[in-house]
């Protein structure tokens, strides 16, 4: 048995497309596409179509939702967001309070 040396792969680009409700900015689905060296870059229309298809497969009603492409440097993975529907930009949202955490602090 031989050990294969693994080389970490880093994408050349990362495209992020969010699917949101245009009435209130609530994000319903986030779709990320990583492109690695040698791969064909996916077009924005292809990314949007895939985003909508996956959201439908997950059970979302997508008829009244819109897509927004977000630059990778403006997106923090574990951060809650909504879309400012006037400016078409992500807006960071406060993290919801975790139940039990505030009760534990009160003891």
Image (cartoon, rainbow, N blue to C red):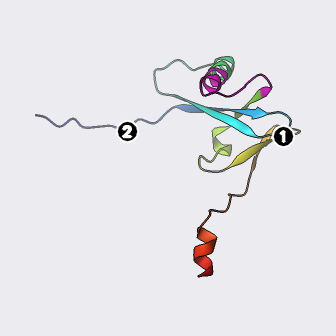
Left/right of residue 84 with respect to residue 42 in the rendered view: right
Q: Position of residue 43 (x, y in %)?
A: 64, 19
Extent of the magenta region: 51-65
Q: Position of residue 97 (x, y in %)?
A: 67, 62
Indicate whether residue 54 is drawn in magenta: yes
Classify residue 62 by image quadrant.
top right
Of 78 and 13, the residue lying toward us = 78
Q: Are marks 2 and 1 in contact (CB under 8 Å)?
A: no
Indicate whether residue 103 is drawn in magenta: no
Element marked by disc 1: loop
Q: Position of residue 90 (x, y in %)?
A: 75, 43
Task: Give the answer, above or below, for where 66 lies relative to 84.
Answer: above
Identify the residue position indicated by label 1 in the image: 24
Task: In the displayed orientation, state which residue is furthest to the right.
Answer: 86
Element marked by disc 2: loop
Q: Position of residue 39 (x, y in %)?
A: 48, 20
Task: Give the answer, above or below, for where 81 lies relative to 4.
Answer: below
Of 43 and 82, the residue lying toward us = 82
Left/right of residue 83 with respect to residue 11 in the rendered view: right
- Name the N-terminal-most of marks 2 and 1: 2
Classify residue 94 by image quadrant.
bottom right
Look at discs 2 and 1 and give the one toward the viewer.
Answer: 1
- Disc 2 to disc 1, C-alpha distance: 40 Å
Residue at 65 percent across and 23 percent down: it is 56
Task: Give the answer, above or below, for where 96 lies relative to 1.
Answer: below
Of 12 and 85, the residue lying toward us = 85
Identify the residue position indicated by label 2 in the image: 8
Quarter of the C terminus within the rendering: bottom right
Q: Residues within 10 Å of mark 2 (few under 14, many from 20)?
A: few
């Amino acid at each position: 048995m031989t050990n294969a040396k693994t080389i970490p792969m880093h994408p050349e680009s990362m495209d992020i497309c969010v699917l949101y409700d245009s009435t209130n900015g609530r994000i319903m689905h986030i779709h990320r596409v990583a492109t690695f060296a040698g791969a064909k870059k996916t077009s924005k229309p292809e990314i949007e179509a895939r985003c909508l298809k996956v959201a439908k497969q997950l059970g979302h009603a997508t008829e009244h939702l819109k897509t927004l492409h977000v630059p990778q440097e403006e997106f923090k993975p574990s951060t809650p967001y909504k879309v400012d529907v006037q400016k078409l930009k992500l807006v960071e949202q406060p993290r919801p309070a975790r139940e039990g955490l505030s009760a534990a602090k009160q003891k």
